[in-house]
Image: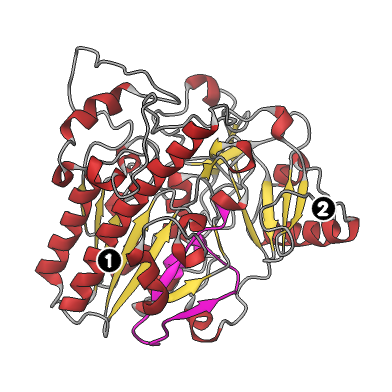
Amino acid sequence: MKAIMVMYDSLNRHMLPNHGCDWTLAPNFAQLAERTVTFDNHYVGSMPCMPARREMHTGRYNFLHRSWGPHEPFDDSTFMEMKKNNIYSHLASDHYHYWEDGGATYHHRYSSWVNVRGQEGDPWKGHVADPEVPEHHGRLARPFLVNKQYMQEEHLTPQAQTFAEGLEFLETNHEEDDWYLQIETFDPHEPFFTLKQWKDKYNYEWDGPVFEWPEYERVTEDPDAQEYLRYQYAALLTQCDHYLGKVIDFMDDHNMWDDTMLMVVTDHGFLLGEHDWWGKMCMPWYNETAHIPLFIWDPRLGVKGERRTSLTQTIDLGPSILEFFDVDIPKDMMGTPLRQVMEDDTPHHEAALFGMFGGHVNVTDGRYIYMRAPEPGNSPLNHYTLMPSHLRRPFSTEELKDMAWHEPLSFSKNCPVMRIPSNGPVGRTPELFETRLFDIENDPDQTQPLNDPVVEQEMIDKMVRVMRQNDAPQEQFERLGLTIPGN
């Protein structure tokens, strides 16, 4: 058996024709509706980029115990388990966070990997002289201004190169057996950089400043600029759709559907002006970022052109891959395989947690979403880790001076861990910490917070239950003002 995962970053469910969008150009995504199972109730777990990838490796939440960081010594890894069982795995990616301090241990879990350079803030090309900075809205970063000079032809763009690497692996190995390929592109993550051929598909006129990279801030731009940025995202989405089509075509041309799983996934979405916000992270995790697309074809089942409503999450992806290859699932993985959901929509999770370390803890049961805000001060809060590293640097000596050893966690394989005090997520302001309850069946846009103490208590009970199942530290309950049953 073989498996292909096509993974995107910041792929918006609400911008896909599969989920009701009628103006973006994405025929190959639309084709997935007839060739795969569409999961209509799929949610993120830990945000943002590398925490989501740790979940795919480990099958358990990241955000209750630490922020963004590397693979831990005690972590299970889906791809290491495959390697032990002689299943070859290959990663082709331009997601440059894999090669930074806070992510540079994940790609080593694969049998082989390819690093395509140049996305976003990737410090790639060496230019001592500062590049010219154009008039612009939003954000521009020096590395990106340098890098984009080397991407002025389609085959030189990171996404094109990433898919070319993936297709090369397929050309070389499609007749072999027992392998997994992960084609992972950073797109359509901001900056929404595409070449003219993709922009022209939307015929949107714009003579204003450069605007392809919004700040994670409140929307302040005029309506024309807002609309233009959404078209920039759409153009990049259409480029993503084009290269997805190349994978589908390869599977068609080489008769791979009989023995090859296809998974099309993302880590999270992105706010494009909804709720008066650009981006993610500093605002609550609304459905535009938390409710994400998932499409799977499983050749063992032959189910296609159908939709599933069972509640599923990122933590289920790793166990699903292991089950497909008949590899034992490590006992510390909390996610479970999606095979039964694909077969007959068997209920999967009673409730699912999602969030970012130090932010709201959110819970959904598929009908309601409850966003529990921390108490004023957002403390106590600690990292539990043996790999104290942030995104682009190790923890500072100032952060580490109050480190204490903590007894083993339920999943740390009898290893004690470092407990390091934290001040919470960067960029989150106190006024954004409000507890909110939404009925997403009757209010799918989350514009009318509910005031229903009975439903709120039901959601609190579900939140506490799942937090306890995942061995959440006691101070997580304390910072949220929650009573732990039995205390």
Q: Say which residue appears at 25% left-offset and 48% top-offset.
A: 159
Please state, as top left, top right, bottom left or bottom right, where the N terminus lies in the image.
Answer: bottom left
Q: Say which residue appears at 44% left-offset and 56% top-offset.
A: 23
Q: Which residues are magenta?
A: 290-319
On residue 83, the disc is 1
Q: Say which residue appears at 44% left-offset and 24% top-offset.
A: 137
Residue 342 location (% of width, % of height): 49, 81
Residue 397 location (% of width, % of height): 48, 21
In the rendered image of this protein, does residue 127 appear above or below residue 91? above
Residue 45 location (% of width, % of height): 56, 55
Give the SS element for disc 2. Answer: loop
Give the SS element for disc 1. Answer: helix
Residue 17 location (% of width, % of height): 45, 63
Residue 477 magenta: no
Q: CA distance from mark 1 to mark 2?
A: 48 Å
Amino acid type of the residue that numbered disc 1 sits on in the rendered structure: Lys
- Residue at numbered disc 2: 450
Does residue 387 show up?
no
* Marks 1 and 2, the one that precedes in the sequence: 1
Q: Around disc 1, counting alpha carbons within 10 Å, would you say few (fewer than 14), some (14 to 19), or many (20 or more)? A: some
Query: Which of 394 and 230 lies nearest the eye of the viewer?
Result: 230
| Label 1 close to label 2 by CB (< 8 Å) | no
